[in-house]
Image (cartoon, helix red, strand yellow):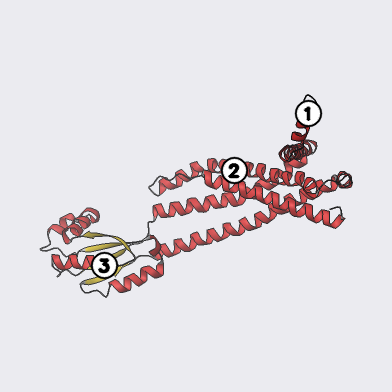
């Protein structure tokens, strides 16, 4: 009975999960040992990768906050429908309900003739002159608020053309010139950010791949010995794959820190600029979902780059 216990422990130690755990520990030990032995080169590599990740991240933050500021300072254009002054109350209500039944319409803010007169009196500064008028010259107004999916120039113009044909509608105004320019500008910034991101992703993959290739070249004799004593390809690949993941992960964390430093530095400037426009706008950083996405993407790029570089080297040298 006593002799069987060591045998049972030995069998448990040779099981799949214990062996897998030892291989994982061996791989990570190799990663950290290599990092300590080449600390300066590893830090320089991580800094280069972090800057490559931080540049598109900062570009995304600029586009995100510019888009938010644009919607805050310049809301989506609405259709202003001027109704015929000769309409009765029932005819006006029927016309407003007909416009409200359009599938693109989210809501309608109706202002009667008296309400439009009060609005004009409040904002124009001609209250004394208005009191001299014998009758109200202003028509009733229906402000049409489109749905989110209808907030496009072509759809808004089509709605304008349809509504103006309705009986009892004098005119329909749509001031979308600034909206078209703003949309074009934000789309241009978005395209630039995506283009920079693609180039930076390629740069990150190349830097990590080159770092792994140099590490493989420095340990080529060890790899040959491991292959000769029967080490599997997965066992040989694992330290390099973990090294690529480690570089991508640490670089992404450093890139997030650099992005937050950038946000902190320009936050005061943005507050001064927004105060000139008569509003308060604070620039926002990355939320948790966005930060986690960047870390995962960087880690995956590190793993894939290490896999491609290691596989290519092993196949070229016929070690695998």
**Quarter of the rendering containing residue 17:** top right
Q: Is residue 62 left or right of residue 126?
A: right
> 23 above or below 149?
above
Q: Is residue 78 left or right of residue 58?
A: left
Query: What's the distance in space between the residues labelled 2 and 1, CA to CA?
Result: 55 Å
For marks 1 and 3, the one nearer the N-term is: 1
Residue 252 location in percent, x, y?
A: 63, 44
Element type at mark 2: helix
Comparing 131 with 245, the one in front is 245
Q: Residue at x 75, y 41 (%)?
A: 42
Q: Which mark is residue 168?
A: none
Residue 207 location in percent, x, y?
A: 73, 51
Element type at mark 3: helix
The residue sitting at the front extreme is 1
Q: Is residue 32 left or right of residue 108?
A: right
Query: What's the distance in space between the residues labelled 1 and 3, CA to CA?
Result: 88 Å
Between circles 1 and 3, the one closer to the viewer is 1
> In the rendered structure, are the residues bearing label 1 and label 3 in contact, judged by CB atoms less than 8 Å apart?
no
Residue 76 location in percent, x, y?
A: 37, 59
Query: What's the distance in space between the residues labelled 3 and 2, CA to CA?
Result: 49 Å
For marks 2 and 1, the one nearer the N-term is: 1
> In the rendered structure, are the residues bearing label 3 and label 2 in contact, judged by CB atoms less than 8 Å apart?
no
Label 1 CA crowd tier, 10 Å (few <14, some 14–19, many 20+): few
Q: Residue at x 78, y 24 (%)?
A: 2
Q: Which mark is residue 4?
A: 1
Q: Is residue 294 left or right of residue 278?
A: right
Q: Residue at x 40, y 49 (%)?
A: 277
Element type at mark 1: helix
Find disc 3 in the rendering and name its residue: 99
Q: Which mark is residue 256?
A: 2
Between circles 2 and 1, the one closer to the viewer is 1
For marks 3 and 2, the one nearer the N-term is: 3
């Amino acid at each position: 009975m006593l002799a069987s216990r060591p045998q049972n422990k030995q069998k448990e130690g040779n099981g799949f999960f214990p062996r897998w755990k030892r291989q994982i520990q061996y791989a990570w030990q190799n990663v950290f040992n290599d990092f300590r032995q080449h600390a300066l080169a590893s830090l320089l590599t991580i800094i280069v990768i972090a800057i490559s990740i931080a540049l598109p991240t900062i570009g995304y933050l600029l586009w995100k906050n510019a888009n938010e500021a644009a919607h805050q300072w310049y809301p989506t254009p609405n259709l202003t429908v001027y109704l015929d002054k000769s309409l009765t109350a029932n005819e006006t209500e029927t016309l407003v309900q007909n416009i409200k039944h359009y599938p693109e319409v989210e809501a309608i803010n109706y202002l009667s003739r008296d309400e439009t007169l009060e609005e004009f009196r409040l904002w124009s500064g001609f209250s004394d002159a208005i009191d001299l008028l014998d009758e109200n010259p202003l028509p009733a107004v229906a402000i049409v608020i489109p749905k989110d999916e209808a907030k496009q120039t072509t759809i808004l113009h089509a709605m304008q053309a349809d509504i103006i044909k309705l009986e009892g509608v004098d005119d329909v105004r749509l001031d979308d010139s600034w909206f078209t320019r703003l949309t074009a500008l934000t789309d241009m910034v978005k395209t630039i950010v995506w283009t920079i991101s693609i180039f930076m992703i390629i740069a990150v993959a190349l830097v990590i791949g080159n770092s792994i290739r140099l590490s493989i070249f420095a340990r080529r004799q060890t790899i040959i010995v491991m292959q000769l004593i029967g080490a599997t390809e997965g066992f040989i690949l694992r330290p390099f794959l973990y090294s690529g993941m480690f570089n991508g992960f640490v670089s992404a964390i450093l890139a997030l820190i650099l992005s937050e430093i950038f946000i902190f530095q320009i936050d005061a400037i943005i507050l001064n600029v927004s105060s000139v426009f008569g509003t308060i706008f604070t620039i926002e950083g990355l939320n948790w979902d966005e930060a986690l996405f960047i870390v995962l993407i960087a880690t995956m790029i590190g793993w894939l780059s290490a896999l491609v570089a290691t596989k290519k080297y092993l196949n070229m040298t016929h070690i695998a």
